C-alpha cells in the first residue's frame, strides 16, 4: 500500500517545480523526448494496473524487476538496485532528523 505521506511528498515536489521556457531551437528535440517519456510512463502505469511489477529505481524504467532496492523493500532492476524513489523521502527524513540532533 502506498502511504499518504509518500503521495504528499511527490505532490508537493510537483507543485514546487515550475515549467521552464524552452528555447525554440530545442523545442522539436524536447517534444521527441517528451513523447518517449510519456510512452514509458503509460507502459509502466498499464503494467502496474495489470499487477505486473515495475522497477522502483527510476520513474521511467521499463525493465522487469529482478532485484530489490538497497533496503530490500521494493522491486528494482539490477541497474537501479542502489536507488529507490519509494525510499527517497525516508532518506530525506532521516537526514533531516540527523541534522536536528
Image (cartoon, rainbow, N blue to C red):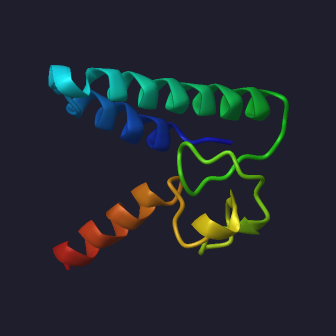
- The N terminus: image quadrant: top right
Question: What residue do we see at 33% from left, 62% from top?
Answer: 92
> Foreground residue, 37 or 80?
37
Question: What residue do we see at 34% from left, 62% from top?
Answer: 93
Judged left or right of residue 28, residue 47 is right
Judged left or right of residue 42, residue 48 is right
- The C terminus: image quadrant: bottom left
Residue 76 at x, y percent in the picture: 68, 60
Residue 31 at x, y percent in the picture: 39, 22
Report whether residue 22 is seen.
no
- Report the number of discs: 0
Residue 95 at x, y percent in the picture: 29, 71
Judged left or right of residue 27, residue 41 is right
> Foreground residue, 2 or 10?
10
Residue 48 at x, y percent in the picture: 75, 34
Farthest residue to the front: give it.
Answer: 25
Picture quadrant of residue 81 = bottom right
Question: What residue do we see at 72% from left, 52% from top?
Answer: 63
Picture quadrant of residue 67 = bottom right
Report whether residue 60 is seen.
yes
Image height of 57 relative to 59, above or below: below
Picture quadrant of residue 89 = bottom left
Image height of 90 relative to 55, above or below: below
Question: What residue do we see at 50% from left, 54% from top?
Answer: 85
Amino acid at each position: 500500500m502506498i502511504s499518504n505521506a509518500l503521495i504528499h511528498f511527490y505532490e508537493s515536489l510537483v507543485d514546487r517545480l515550475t515549467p521552464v521556457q524552452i528555447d525554440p531551437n530545442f523545442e522539436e528535440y524536447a517534444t521527441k523526448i517528451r513523447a518517449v517519456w510519456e510512452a514509458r510512463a503509460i507502459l509502466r502505469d498499464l503494467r502496474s494496473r495489470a499487477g505486473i511489477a515495475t522497477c522502483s529505481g527510476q520513474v521511467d524504467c521499463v525493465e522487469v524487476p529482478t532485484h530489490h532496492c538497497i533496503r530490500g523493500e521494493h522491486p528494482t532492476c539490477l541497474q537501479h538496485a542502489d536507488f529507490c524513489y519509494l525510499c527517497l523521502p525516508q532518506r530525506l527524513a532521516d537526514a533531516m532528523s540527523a541534522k536536528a540532533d
